[in-house]
Amino acid sequence: MNEKIELANAHLAAGRLVEASTALAGYLRENPLDVKAWMFSGATLYRQRRYPEAVDYFRTAMRLNPENPDIYADLGVALRADQRVGEAEAMLRESIRRNPKNPLPVFTLANLCMSQRRYPEAEHLYRGLLAANPDSLPALENLASLLIEINRPADAMVLIDAFLIRNPDHIQGLTYKAIALDRLGQLDSALEAAQRSIVLDPPRRLEMRLASYMSLVGRTGRLDLRPHVLALVDEATSLSLPDDAPERWYEAERNALRRFTYLFPYYGIKDRDLLKVHRALGNQIAANFPPTILHPPTRPGKLRVGYLSYNFGNHPIGQLLSVFFEAHGHETAELFLYSLHQQAPTVDVDLYGQRIQATADQYRDCRNLSDRELSRLIRADDLHVLIDLDGYLHGGRPEVLATRPARIQIHWLQSLAGSPAPFFDYTIVDRVIVPDAERDQGNGPLIRLADAFQCGEKLALSPILPSRANEGLPEKGFVFCVFGNWLKIDQEVFDIWTKILSEIPDSVLWFTAGPTPESMNTLRQMTADRGLDPNRLVMAQRTPDKSSHIDRHRLADLFLDTFTFSAATTTTDALSAGLPVLTKQGCTAQGRLSESLIRAVGPTELIVTTADDYIETAIRLAREPTELAQHKQALADALPNARLFDAKRMARQFDHIYAMTWQRYQAGEPPCHFDVPNDV
C-alpha cells in the first residue's frame, strides 16, 4: 500500500480528518486516475461536512468510472447533504437502477422523501429495506419515526414489537417502544420500557432515550425518579458537551439536543448547561444548513417585519400574541406573518388564529412548504427583520432560519436565557428574567424589554361567579390553585405543598388535568403516604374555551407557583382573573418568569426569596382572610393600568427594537446587548 494512503488511514483511525484529507490530496496529485482514492477522499471530506468538495471528488470518480453504482450512491448522499435535492434524487435512483441490492441509496432516498413529506413513498422504501433485512435497525427506526410523525403509532408498535420478540433487550428497540407508547397515551407502559433501557445500559451521553426517559418521568408524576434523571443528565452533559473540547459538541445527537432544550428548564438545570445545549444544537444546524446568497439592497418603504410560528392559533403563543398583533402599529412597519400550522375552528374555539391572521399586512400559509421553499418565500418578501417564536419546539423550523432568509433574525418567547446560535442575532427577554449578572454566560446578544417578556389579554369576566361544585371543589375551605404543566412539579415543591395542606385543615390543591388518570393517582398516593386525604388533590377538567378557564380562577383563594420553572401563561391567567400569585425568586431564567409578570402588574409583596418564606406566607394568608383580601384588592386596583396587559406599550417597545436593530445593521455594527428604554 502506498505510504500516503497508509498515512491517511492512520490519521483517520486517530480521528484526524483534516490531516487524512491532506495526505490523500498528496496521493491524488501523483495518482490522478485512482478511482478508489477519489472515493476515499470524497468520503473523508463528507465526514468533515465539506459537502461541496465531497461532491466534486465523487464527480471526478464518476468521470473516471461511470459504470460503478457505488459512486452514484456516494454522490447522491453528498448532494443531499449539500441541499441539492433534485440532483441527489437522480443519482440515488440511478444507483438503485444499477444495483437494487445496495441498501445505502435506498435508505438515503427514503430519508430524502421523508424530509420532503412524501410519506407514502418513504414508507414503501423503508418497508422494502425491512423485507430484505428485518433487523435493519436504521430502517426500523426511521420507519417507526415516520409512522409516529404521521399519527400512526399503533402501526409503529407492530414493527417494534416484532423486532423486540427477536431482540428482547435491544436498547434502541426499547427506546422506540417507549416513544410509540407515549404517542398512544400509554405513559406508564412507556416509562416501563424506557426504564428497562436505562437499567440495561445507563446512558452516558445526551441521547434520545435519555430525553424520552426524562420527559416520561416528569409527565407521569414520578417525583421519586427525578433525582436519578438529574444525575444521568449531569454526567451526560459533561461527556457530550465538554468545556475543553467544543469540537466534540458536533457529535451529540441533534434530535436529542432539540428535546433537551425543552426539558432542561423543567428540571431546573442551570442556565449555563442549557445554553451549552443551545450552542451545540445551533452550531450543528448551521453547519448542515449553511446560509444562501447575500441579500441585495433593500427596497424603499416601511420596514418589513416578519413573525414565524407553528402556533398562530389556540396555543399559549397564539393566545399571548393575538392582542399584541392587534395593537401593532402599521405606520412604520409592514407586518408579515408566516404560519406553519393552521388549526381548525373546532379546535381553535376562541378563533385566535383568525384574530392573528386579520392583523397581518401579508399572511402566509406555509403548512405544506419544504424548508427550501419556505426559505425562498421569506427571502422573496425582502424582510428587514424576522422574529422566530418557536425556537426548537415541535413545529419550529430552525433549519430554515439557518439559511438566513432575513437580514436580521431574532428569537422571542421560548429560550428565555438566550439563543446562542449562528442564525439568531438577538434574543428578546427582560430585565428580571436575565438580570445584569446573568447575561454574559454564553447567552448571545440580548434585547431586554422594559417590562415583562410577554404581554397578556385581560378578558371580560362573567358577572356570575362560577360554581365550586361544578369544578369538584368543596363549598367551604381554602383552595390553593396549582395550575400548570406537570413537568414543573418536583419533589421539593410537592413536599412544600403537602406541608401547607397539613397546616390548613379543609384546604385543597387544585390541579389542571394530568397527562393521564394514572399520573394523578401517583400524586394522590404520595399524598396518602404523607398521612393526608388524597381527595384533597382536586383535578380540574379541561374547559372548552380560554375565557371560561380564566373565569374559574375566581373560585381559588391563592395561586401557588412552582420553583424550577415558574408559571408563565398560567400566572398571566391568574393575575388577569384577580387571583394573587405567590412565587419564589428563581435561580434560572425560567425560574424567574412569574416574578417578571407580577412586577409588570404592580404589587410585589408575594414575591419571596426562600422556600421557608413561601411556606410561611401561604399558611399565613390561608389563616388571615383580611390580609388575603388586602392582596386581592391591591391586585384589583393595579390591573386597569398594569403594564402586563398594555399591548400598545409592548407594540411600541417592538417598534423601538425594529428601529434599533436595523440601525445597527445599516451601520455594519455587530449585534450586542441593549435594553429598551422605560419611557418608550
Image: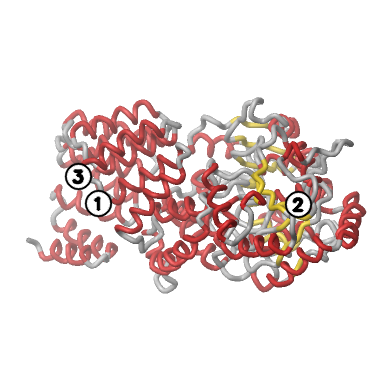
Q: What type is the residue that disc 2 sits on? A: Val
Extreme residue toward the left, this view:
1
**Residue 368 position within the rendered picture, expressed as x and y whole percent measured from the top left:** 52, 29
Q: Quadrant of the C terminus?
A: bottom right
Q: Residue at point 22% right, 59% down?
A: 25
In this figure, which residue is indicated by the disc labeled 3? 61
**Residue 66 position within the rendered picture, expressed as x and y whole percent measured from the top left:** 17, 36
Labels 2, 1: front one: 2
Q: Residue at point 19% right, 50% down?
A: 38
**Residue 227 position within the rendered picture, expressed as x and y whole percent measured from the top left:** 48, 65
Crowdedness near tag 2: few (<14), some (14–19) or many (≥20) residues, C-alpha within 10 Å: many
In this figure, which residue is indicated by the disc labeled 2? 479
Q: What type is the residue that disc 1 sits on? A: Ala
Quadrant of the rendered structure where residue 601 is?
Answer: bottom right
Between marks 2 and 1, how big is the CA–CA gap?
65 Å
Labels 1, 3: front one: 1
Left or right of residue 675, residue 173 in this image: left
Q: Is residue 301 visible?
A: no
Badge number at residue 490? none
